[in-house]
Structures are given as C-alpha cells and as structure tokens.
Image: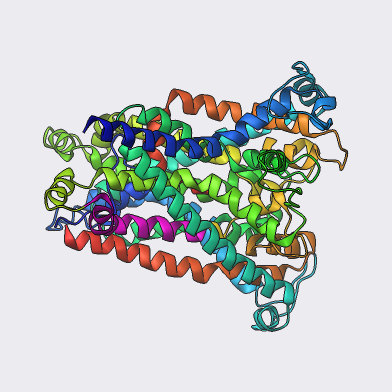
Amino acid sequence: MPRIEADVTIPESPGGIAAETSLRAPRISPWKPRAGEERLAYVLLAPAVLLLASLIAYPFLTSLYMSLTDRRIAMPGRFVGLRNFSELLLEDEIFQQTLWNSGLYVVGAVGLKTVTGLAAALLLHGMTRGRPVFQALLMLPWVVPASLSVLAWWWMFDPMSSVINWVLVNLGIISRPIRWLSDPFWARSAIVITNVWRGLPFFALCFLAGLVSIPRELYEAAESDGAGPMASFWHITLPLLRPMLGIVILYSVVMTIADFEIVFLLTRGGPRNSTHLLGTLAYHVGLSGGRLGEAAAISLFIFPVLAVVAYFMLRAVRHGAEVS
Amino acid sequence: MRRAGAGRRWLIYGGFLPFLVFALFPFYWMAVTSLKSNQEIYGAQQIPLLVRQGMTLDHFRYVLRETLFTRWMLNSLIVSGSSTLISAGVSTLAAYALARLRFRGSQFFGMAVFITYLVPPTLLFLPLSRLVASLGVSDTPWALILTYPTFLVPFCTWLLMGYFRTIPREMEESALVDGANRMQAMVRIVLPLAAPGVLTAIMFAFTISWGHFIYALAFVSSNPQKMVNIGLATELIRGDVFYWGSLMAGALLTSLPIILVYGFFAKRFVSGLTAGAVKA
C-alpha cells in the first residue's frame, strides 16, 4: 500500500505545511564546497538571522530570566529562583484554574475541529460540481481576521439580544435564553464554538488535500472486494490520512493553547476566571497588573507544549524524508 | 444506480449546508446589524434576521465621522504595508539561500525557521513590550513595524522555501553554465519565476498583520496611534447600550479589503491557506 506522506503538495502554491519538503536534505547529494556559494548564502541569510535573533531569541531569553525574578513595571526586581513557578503551581488558584481551562479548551476545540473538519472535507471531496465555490465560501472565517469577526460573535452572544438565543427559542430547542458569557459552562462553550468556527476551514482544507492525494484505485479495489463505504473509510481513508491528521492536530494544539483574542474579546477571562488561558492571564497579570516576573513565568508554560509539538512535527517531517 | 447517485448527491450537498450556514452567518449578522436603525437593533418582539424597518447608513456615518476610524485605518495601512514589505524582502533572500544554496549549517537554519514559525506571539509579548519600551518606540507605529516581522518572516520564509523548490533547477544551472554567477542567476532567472510565490507571501503577510491582535494591543495604547482592529474593539465600547450597530459597521468596513483581495485571488488564497496563516 503506498504511503501518503504528510506533505501532500497542493497545486498552485506549495506553502507552509505543504512545504515540509523544505526541511529535507538537499537533493544534490555530493556536497561540493563552492566558496562563493557559501558566502552568498550567509549574506542572504544575514538579515533574517539578525532579525530572528534579536526579536525572538533574545526576548525569549530575557523572559526566561524575567521569570526568575520578582520584577514589576518600573522596578528592577530581585532574583528569586524558581519561586514564581512553584507559587503558581502550588498556591495560585487562578493559575491552576487557568491550566485546567486551557486543557479543556484545547481538547474541546481541537477535538471538534478535527471531527467537523474531517466531515466537511469528506463532503467537499464527494462533490461533483461547485466544489471551488463551496470551498471558497467555507474559507471565509479563516480569511477574515479573528480580531474583527469575533466582534460579530461577541454581539451574537450578547446577554440581552443574542440572536443565537432568539433562533434556539423560536425553534423550540430551549425555553429560556442561555447566559452565554456570564455562566462558566456556557462561556467556555462560547469560546470553544468561536475557536471551532475560526479553525474549521483550515482543518477542512488540509484534510481535503490529504483526501485528494489518496489514489482512487484503492477505493475501487476495496469496492470490488465487497467493502462498503464505512469499511473503506476505516481501512483506507483514515490510515492514509493519519500523517496529515497528526501534523494538523499538533500544529493546532500550539496555536489553540496560545490563543488570545477570542478570550480577550469575548470574556476577558471571566466569569470568575473560568475562561482564562495562559496568554490572557499573563496579559492581565503582567501588563494590567504590572507583575512582570510572574507574568513571564505564566506565559512560559506555553513553552513545553511548543517544544513537544516541535519535536514531533520535526520527527514526522524527517520520517517522511526517509521513506521517500 | 441513478437513484443511488441522486441520493448520494442530496446527502453531500444537504450535509454541507449546515457548515455553510455556520461559516457565513456571523458575516451576514454583521452586515444586517450594521444596516439596522438602533431602534430596530434593540427593539423586542420582532424577527431580527432581516432588516424590516428600512436600512440606514447612520452607523457607517457615525464610525467614519465621529470616531478616529479613518485615522486607525491609516495606521493599519502604514504598519501592515511596511512590515509586509520588510518581511517579504528579508524572507525572499533567506528562502532562496535555504532552498537553493549549499552551505554549512543549512539544515540548522532551516530547522530554526521552522521552530520560530511555531512560536506563538503570546509567548513573546511580555519581553517584547520591555524591548520596545527600552528602544523608546512604545506607542508609535515603529513598535509594530519592528515586531510584526517576528511572525511574518518565519511564515514567509517557510512559504517561499516551498515555492523556490518548485522552480526547476535546470534553468538556473544553464544560466550558470552560460557564465552568470549565482547572484545574477538568482536575480535574473529565479526571482522572476518566483514572483507569483512572492505575491502570495505578500498577500498573506498583509492579511496576517492587518488582523494581528496581541502586539497591537500591548505595545500601542493611545487612541490616535491604534491599529483599526484594536481601535474598534477598545474605543467603540463605552458600556453604552447603543454601539453594536457602529461596531458591526466598523468591523465590516475593516474586513472588506481582506474579503475583496480574497475574492480576486480566491484560488491562490485557498491553495496557499495550508501555509497556516493561523497566526492571524
């Protein structure tokens, strides 16, 4: 059975996830040092390296250091070792709550995006006509910046005039309006729904790219062996889509746990801190509250997730390289 | 056989309908709200899904005349335009080197780009806010022009590396054989061929900076300096009941440039989306 690699190349523009081939070893094998070529490479890379070193690597290191101090805005701060981290983990109930919120948010949102994104991709894949149009329309939530579209969701969740409540009441699904942003359970649901709305197109598009690259002959062979659509799905589609599923899910986990604007715009972390994520809490503690050391420690909790995901994504990419 | 085909089609298009409604309703609701009078927006006892009491452009007028909206738009244009151009330039050079040239450490640099591509802005906004303050550019467009490339450059480099790889190496090699040096081969042969890729990168970079939230919120705080998305989200909200119409009008006006660009380049946009413009 042919192995479908995760880096299915999408026609037209081979960007991003589709560009995983970029990490593979250069195809031209025997490395012949050409002095001019090497020098040119360093010259061309210099601006990017300078920029990333001074604006990503250096700030990252200062935030590592900051997290080990009790620094506040306009005060130098003393070195306190790991006290920020231990206090957050052991004593700070709002932080513990935030970790729990983040877990729920990531599992809920990424899980739903995977299922609905796969469903949408399968439907698009099955379309005989009109696919480009439907695909383009489905993409809109992804295209329009979240900082603008979430304003519409905010209004749709408005306590007084929520249109969602109006529809649900009039369809007879609920009898009393849902307190979308003021009840912890519904506030969490609201941010998950909004995140799913925003991320579903990306999932659907990646999965569709994976589906398109599965050879039709496999399905035909399975059909002639008497396999029904469900069997084909479990034994052909899912296994062959797995590398793509893995990469998309990993990528989304980082982006979802580091989410900021949905929560900031809809709930600001409330009610009773039930929707705070690491980013919004760090913003609240650091920039609104001025406790920089503590806030740096909070946002650094994103780092282990990032590291694990980066490791697995790199491994997936490398693995792909060995097979090909 | 024919019946089965029809049933299947019904299932597919019918099944897709809820996805379409889910995806598009918020935009529809944004448009409908922006065209309603305040009286209708907050009036009880009616069907809110349509404009029934006459459309009005009052909310658009209010946003354009009574707020700093046009000023914010200008700020956004300046910041997004500059950071996009800087990033596209820096990334094109880096991507060419990483995709095409043989040098020690190319693997390492490729990996570094990939890892920085994954770093979410949420992880860096605190130290960057200190850095911006120590450079004395807080609350100016420079704070953003300087920091937006931190997420644009890894993204564009990654996208362009893939693009450069699709350009046949032979074209370049034949130029080299004809006596051109690497630099000439790059400028005369590869860059023109890569133009569509660079254009895609520019389009994405502009969209991402146009909507970027956390740095714009954290590094700029005085009203006239704000980016348009931050201005809308923070200045039009005064705890006053009558702002939803103008907020939706503003959000619509601000989304429009992006939707128009998308409409013109839908195909490229869709195929390039997998590039993971997630950071928007």
Residue depicted at 74% across the width and 45% down the height: B139
Q: Position of residue A246 (x, y in %)?
A: 36, 60
Q: Can you see residue B136?
A: no
Relative to residue B279, is residue B190 drawn left or right? left
Q: Position of residue A214 (x, y in %)?
A: 22, 47
In this rendering, the answer to whether A241 lies above or below B84 is below
Q: Give the range drawn in magenta.
A: A228-254
Which of the pair A73/A320 is nearer the observer?
Answer: A320
Residue depicted at 71% across the width and 60% down the height: A283
In this rendering, the answer to whether B169 lies above or below A110 is above
Please say whether residue A247 is one of the residues in the magenta stretch: yes
Relative to residue B147, is residue B204 drawn left or right? left
Which of the pair B240/B202 is nearer the observer?
Answer: B240
Relative to residue A139, is residue A324 drawn left or right? left
Q: What type of secondary structure mainly makes up the magenta span?
A: helix
Residue depicted at 74% across the width and 79% down the height: A78
Quarter holding residue B165: top left
Quarter holding residue A274: bottom right
Quarter holding residue B133: bottom right
Q: In which quarter of the image is the N terminus of chain A?
A: bottom left
